[in-house]
Amino acid sequence: MADNATLTHDDVRAIADLARLQLSDEEVAKYAEQLSAILHDFQKLQAVDTSHIDPIASVLPLKSVMREDTPLPALKPEDAVSNAPDSDDDQFRVKAVLDGDGSA
């Protein structure tokens, strides 16, 4: 790289090659400019003194969003199939998925 925040066209082509991307010359020029701007912004962020800030794993409060796994009574068979498009004797009826000879 030319300097820490500027990507050359060769740098962009090398990155594109690693990502298996085929870029036109116009795209290479465009991405060199855009990626250089992004790298420049990251350099600004790295210059910020964060030594007085404790490291954290997440900015969100540490609490479980999962509910308790409380068993409930099972559905009655007739309730389970009540909205089925086709049923017989409290069982779901579906179209056959295998041929008659047993092969898939």
Image (cartoon, rainbow, N blue to C red):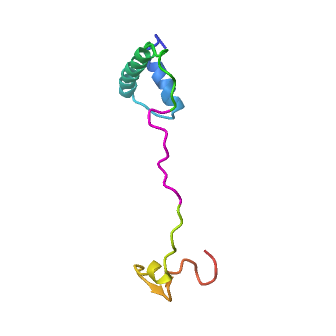
- Residue 92 seen from this side: no
Residue visible at 45% across and 13% down in the picture: 49
Q: Nearer the viewer, residue 85 or 104?
A: 85
Tag count in the figure? 0
Position of 101 with respect to 86 (left or right) is right
Q: Nearer the viewer, residue 91 or 39?
A: 91
- Magenta stretch bounds: 58-69
Position of 83 with respect to 57 (left or right) is left
The question of residue 50 being in magenta is answered with no
Image coordinates of residue 17 in percent, x first then y, are: 51, 30
Residue visible at 48% across and 54% down in the picture: 67
Q: Is residue 59 above or below residue 48?
A: below
Chief secondary structure of the magenta portion: loop
Image coordinates of residue 104 in percent, x first then y, are: 60, 74
Outermost residue, top side: 3
Outermost residue, bottom side: 89
- Residue 63 seen from this side: yes
Image coordinates of residue 80 in percent, x first then y, are: 46, 78
Residue visible at 44% across and 32% down in the picture: 59
Q: Nearer the viewer, residue 54 or 1?
A: 54
Residue visible at 49% across and 39% down in the picture: 62
The question of residue 59 being in magenta is answered with yes
Q: Is residue 86 above or below residue 38?
A: below
Q: Is residue 74 above or below residue 21?
A: below
Image coordinates of residue 75 in percent, x first then y, are: 49, 76
